[in-house]
């Protein structure tokens, strides 16, 4: 199911057959250089893919989505909107990761800007954040081009992390050239159901303790949320 489209990219729900392509990203030390947990094993990648097959388990309108290059129909990354609990506050992160052959082509910015527009216009979120290693200058530039501004620095999983933020009010202000998106025709995420082989159905009850610890960031202060509390919106 397509979630959103841009001029060059199509973002859709992850599918079981995306596993090898996702692992090719997650096992690359250069791509994973700025992730606190580093590279992932094949089994860890499979667990993450299963976690997001139907969107985020607690908030199915959010999640990590397969990023497809339209001209080649190739899986080139995974981008999306991820809920976090930071200092007891529910936040939504704009996440973007692309394969190395597609770096420095403006595709990260294209994806990030489209995710911002989707979050504010379609999901009516009141605020978005980007969580970035302070040394990751390329990711910082991408966030800035998507309208994010530095807010503060926190420590996550033993690593310094910069919080960049953008509010719905700021989104209403002109930023320059934006990336138009095409909303998927089957984009009613809360109401949709995807037919998946029973061997790939995600259940938080069967997720391994190691994966759950990683998804929770080893911390209750800064963690990908499992709360079903409503995401803050402007409605």
Image (cartoon, helix red, strand yellow):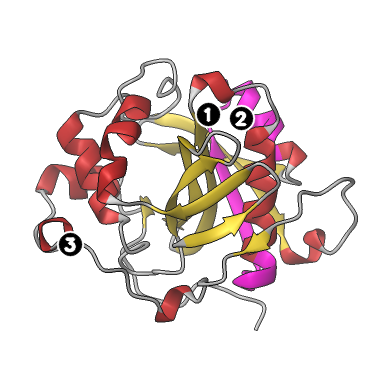
Is residue 228 shown to the viewer in this render? yes
Establish if 31 lies above or below 93.
above
Quadrant in which the N terminus appears: bottom left
Residue 201 numbered tag: 3
Comes first in the chain, label 3 or label 2: 2
Q: Nearest the camera: 99 or 82?
A: 99
Q: Is residue 222 magenta?
A: no
| Residue beneath disc 2 | 139
Residue 218 at least partly seen = no
- The residue that appears at 67% across and 61% down in the rendered structure is 182
Q: Real-space Cα distance between discs 2 and 1?
A: 8 Å
Q: Mark 1 points at which residue?
A: 133
Tell me residue 225's x, y (percent): 36, 60
Q: Mark 2 packing: few (<14 Cα in 10 Å), some, or many (20+)?
A: many
Left or right: 53, with 231 as reference point: left
Q: Give the range drawn in magenta.
A: 120-143
Q: How crowded is the residue under tag 3: few (<14 C-alpha within 10 Å), some, or many (20+)?
A: few
Please state which of residues 70 and 9 is positioned toward the viewer in this rendering: 70
User: Mark 2, mark 1: which one is toward the viewer?
Assistant: 2
Q: How crowded is mark 1: few (under 14 residues within 10 Å), some or many (20 or more)?
A: many
């Amino acid at each position: 199911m397509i979630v959103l489209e841009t001029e060059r990219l199509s973002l859709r729900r992850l599918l079981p057959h995306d596993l090898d392509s996702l692992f090719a990203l997650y096992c690359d030390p250069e791509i994973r250089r700025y992730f606190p947990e580093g590279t992932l094993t094949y089994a860890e990648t499979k667990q993450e893919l299963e976690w997001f097959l139907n969107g985020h388990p607690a908030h199915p309108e959010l999640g990590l989505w397969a990023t497809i290059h339209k001209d080649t129909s190739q899986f080139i990354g995974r981008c999306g909107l991820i809920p976090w609990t930071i200092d007891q506050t529910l936040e939504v992160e704009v996440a973007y990761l692309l394969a190395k052959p597609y770096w420095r082509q403006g595709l990260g910015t294209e994806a990030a800007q489209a995710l911002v527009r989707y979050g504010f216009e379609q999901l009516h979120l009141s605020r978005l954040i980007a969580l970035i290693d302070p040394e990751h200058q390329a990711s910082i530039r991408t966030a800035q081009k998507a309208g994010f501004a530095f807010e503060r620095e926190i420590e996550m999983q033993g690593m310094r992390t910069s919080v960049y933020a953008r509010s719905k009010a700021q989104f209403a202000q002109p930023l320059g050239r934006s990336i138009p998106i095409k909303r998927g025709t089957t984009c009613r995420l809360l109401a949709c159901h995807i037919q998946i082989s029973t061997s790939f159905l995600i259940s938080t009850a069967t997720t391994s303790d190691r994966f759950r610890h990683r998804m929770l960031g080893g911390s209750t202060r800064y963690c990908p949320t499992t709360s079903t509390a409503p995401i803050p919106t402007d409605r």
